[in-house]
Image (cartoon, rainbow, N blue to C red):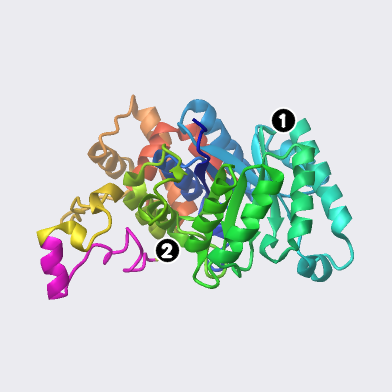
Amino acid sequence: MAVKPVIYLLDVTNRDGVQTSRICLSKLQKTMINWYLDQMGVFQSEFGFPLTRHETNYLNANLELVKLGGFSRIRLSGWLRATKDDVKNAFKLVPKLKYLNLSISTSDQMIVHKFKGKLDHDSIIKEMQEAVAEAIKLGALGVGVNAEDASRTDVDYLIKFALKAKEAGAHRIRYCDTLGCDTPFSIYEKIKLLAEAVKLPIEVHCHNDLGLVVANSIAGAKAASDAGVDSYINTCVNGMGERAGNADLVSVILALKYGQYMADYHLDEKINLKTAWKICKYASYAFGVPIPINQPGVGSNAFAHESGIHADGALKDRRNYELYDYEELGRGEPEIIETGRKITAGEYSGIKGFRNVYEKLEVPFKNDEEATRILELVRYANVHNQKPLVDDELKFIAKYPDIAHKIFTMTP
C-alpha cells in the first residue's frame, strides 16, 4: 500500500509574524513561541533572520537549546535572501544552522519593478542555484527555496525555476502567495501543476488580503497531496503577519481535522491540538494583540451560545451546534485570578519577593548563589520584555539560565 503524502506545519510567527507593522516580540518571547510550538508538535519554526545582528545571540542560543534537549521535536530554520554571499555570512554568524529557506522574487512584476534591471529571469535562477549549492556545502540539512510572488509568476517559468532548484539540491519549493491574490481554485490548479512537474515537497505560504488565507493554504496542501508529494503549510499563531496576516495556526489544524472531504488527507500525526489555548493566549499577551471573540477554536465566543434554539440544541447534544470539542483545544479549566495579595517578580525585585514567586511555582534553588543569579536574570528579562513575565517564562529562566543570559545579551 502506497504511503500517503503528509501535510506538515511550518510556523513562521518568528519570521513573518514579527514583520507585522507596529508590533514586536522580545528574544525571550520568540524563544517561548518556539517552545510552545515544540509542545504542539509543529514540525518546523522559521525562527528568525541569521543576517540580522540583533538576532545572532538568540538564534545561537535556541540552537544550543536543541542540543540540550530543550526542544523535543521542532526544527529551527532561518530565512535568507537567495544569494551566495548571504549564505556564507549567515553560517559565519550562526554556524550550527542546519535548516533554512532561501528567498527570491520570480514574478514579472517584481523582476521589472523591484529588481529594476539588476536581475532577469536567467540570473534569478543562477543566483538561487549558487545559494542552494553554497548552503549544502556549508552543512545545511534542509533547504527550502522560496518563489516570492509565485501566485503572479508565469507557471511555465515557475516550473523551470523549481526544477533548477531541485537540480541544485533544494529539498522543498515554497509557493508564496505574497499579495494574497490567489483563490482556492487558482492555487489548487497551479500547485498541482507545479508538484506534478517537479516532484518535490511544496510549502504553501499565503497571505490574507482577500480573507482567503486558510482556504488557500488547505487548497494548496490538498493539491500537493493529490500530486503525490508532501506539503508544508506556513502558519502564524493567531494569524499574525504582514498587512492582513498569514494563515492562523489553529484554524489550519481545525480545517485539516474537521473540514469536509479532508478525512483522506494525512495531517502530521505529532500535532497536539491541546496546546492551542496556551500558545494562543501567550502570543496574544506577548504581541499585545487581543484574540478576536469570533476567532476559530480559541475566541471567547467560539463555544458560546445565547440564541434559545442554539442553547437548547447544544445542551441536548453538543454536536448539534459544535463541530469539535473545546477540551480538544486545551480549554475548559477555569482561569484563576488572585484578587488578594500578589507578589510579582520585576526589574526592581528583591530576593524575598523573588523567592516567594518561585516558591509558588514550586521551583527550588540549590543555594543562595543560584537564587541571586536567577533573580538578576529575571530582572533583565522584565527589562527585555517590557512587561511582567508569565509563569512559563519564569520557569524557563530557572531551568536554562545560561541560555536566558545569551538571549538577553546584545552588542550593538
Left or right, residue 285 beside residue 323: right
Write down the region rendered in magenta. Answer: 290-315
> How far across and down, in percent of the image, does residue 132 sit?
77, 41
Tell me how far mark 2 sits from mark 1, CA to CA: 38 Å
Mark positioned earlier in the residue sequence (2 or 1): 1
Q: Secondary structure at mark 2?
A: loop
- Front position in the image: 262 or 403: 262
Q: Which residue is mark 2?
A: 288
Farthest front residue? 1
Q: Residue at x 22, y 63 (%)?
A: 321
Q: Residue at x 74, y 41 (%)?
A: 166
Q: Secondary structure at mark 1?
A: loop
Q: Decide if residue 255 is in sight here.
A: yes
Q: Which mark is residue 329?
A: none
> How far across and down, in percent of the image, does residue 156 sit?
77, 58
* Dot 2 alpha-carbon crowd within 10 angstroms: few under 14, some 14 to 19, many 20 or more: few
Name which residue type carries label 1: Gly
* Dot 1 alpha-carbon crowd within 10 angstroms: few under 14, some 14 to 19, many 20 or more: some
Classified by dominant secondary structure, the portion drawn in magenta counts as: loop
- Front position in the image: 156 or 411: 156
Q: Decide if residue 240 is in sight here.
A: no
Q: Quadrant of residue 374?
A: top left
Name which residue type carries label 2: Gly
Farthest bottom residue? 307
Residue 301 colored in magenta in the image: yes
Left or right, residue 300 beside residue 102: left
Q: Which mark is residue 139?
A: 1
